[in-house]
Image: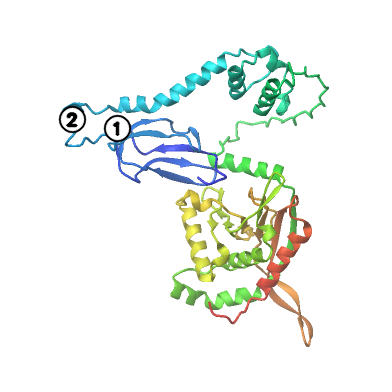
Amino acid sequence: MGESVAEATITSWLKEVGDTIELDEAIVEIATDKVDSEVPSEVEGVLVERLFNVDDVVEVGQTLAIIETDAAGTVDEDATPAAKEAPAPTPAEVKEQALEPIAAVEQTVAAAVTEIKSSPSGKFYSPLVKNIAQKEGISLDELEALNGTGKDGRVTKNDILGYIENRSNGGVAKPAVKTETPQPKQAAAPKVTPITVSGEDEIVEMTRMGKLVSKHMVDSVQTSAHVQSFIEIDVTNIVKWRDKVKNAFLEREGEKLTFTPIFMQAVAATIKKFPLINISVQGDSIIKKKNINLGMAAALPDGNLIVPVIKNADQLNLVGMTRQVNDLANRARANQLKPDEIQDGTYTVTNVGSFGSIMGTPIINQPQVAILALGTIRKMPAVIETLDGDFIGIRHKMFVSHSYDHRVVNGALGGMFIKSLKETLEAWDAHQDF
């Protein structure tokens, strides 16, 4: 599902228990905050059990269903009579055998954990800490006296292992009693004023994707220190060139030439000049991304946004970029994107101009550190400098908004990036071929 996806919601089961399943046949439909997709079977066999229901949220790595295969059930012709006569296991037996190791582990852990009763002081001890304490003969009183370094003074694995090591080396006979220190008062949570709903109002439940996108946006604002820079770009040469070649481009390449691939190609080239825009932050470390994978925000029919990713965008010429942009945009609107086509983006571009906006202040798509918003192209009166002097003319201009994470991208880098992008676009050769 990609490194940034931790869970998915089951939206529909395509197979019932007892159904025969072919290799690569879709079994279940799932949805993340980015895309809906089908999960194909990796084996042939019969569906024995579905372990989750529709609308259940499943973590990546969990088992969705049990499929009985005949890979281990074939009997050689030269086998002994006893082997030939042995009946094939039923689906229920297969399921029971598959779950036996899991049940044994659960029982072992449960037995170890229940030996340590609930803490009289109300402290929380994780099952791992309880299990270690049980194996090492550490009493509940000793646990109670341990100074925990975890959140809210919680005893962690390292705390208890350190205590065991000191005890075995004769360093301590018993843990020091934790002294109570006054905790600073936390600010009270902001009071939410209830909204008055009249009989004429309509209450509409947010969609699953809407809820996830909403959370993703709030998390991004709380994670990154957002700063914006703006610049105006004269794209007259690009507009004239596109008007001149778009019909020939469509006839020769079979693709409609829009402004988006032109801008995406220029953005990829600019990122190559400023690689510190193409990074992510992990704790106190900066991860410099080797590939330039451009996210392209696309609007869905229901009003939500999705961000398909153009992988290795700096390696595409204009024709290749146009094919990628058109294909991803069309399949995004048809809800046909695959999970890997919305993963691993390193920088995002959103076209707010498609809605008539002259500029915008987009929210960074985590874990990236910057996002570019393209405003609408407008005819504007402008001062044109020539060798014979200055005069006023009609030019095609647009604003570009650059939002970046001020924790790692300072104003100089953020500003130089869009200044270089402006120079690239304004230097467009209106007489070139495609």
Residue contact between numbered discs 2 and 1, judged by CB atoms under 8 Å: no
- State the image quarter where residue 164 is shown: top right
Q: Which residue is drawn at 78% across and 61% down?
A: 412
Residue 5 position (above or below residue 183): below
Question: In this figure, which residue is indicated by the disc labeled 1?
Answer: 18
Disc 1: CA contacts within 10 A as few (<14), some (14-19) or many (>=20): some
Image position of 208 (left or right of 165): left
Give the x, y percent position of residue 184: 82, 27
Image position of 318 (left or right of 153): left
Which of the pair 331/277 is nearer the observer?
Answer: 277
- Ranked by sequence position, the earlier of labels 2 and 1 is 1
Q: As shown in the figure, which amino acid type bears the numbered disc 1? A: Gly
Q: As shown in the figure, which amino acid type bears the numbered disc 2? A: Thr
Q: How far apart are marks 2 and 1 (CA)?
A: 31 Å
Give the x, y percent position of residue 43: 34, 41
Q: Which residue is drawn at 65% across and 44% down?
A: 217
Q: Can residue 122 be seen in this view?
A: no
Residue 228 position (above or below residue 133): below
Q: Residue furthest bottom?
A: 388
Question: In this figure, which residue is indicated by the disc labeled 2?
Answer: 80
**Colour scheme used in the picture?**
rainbow
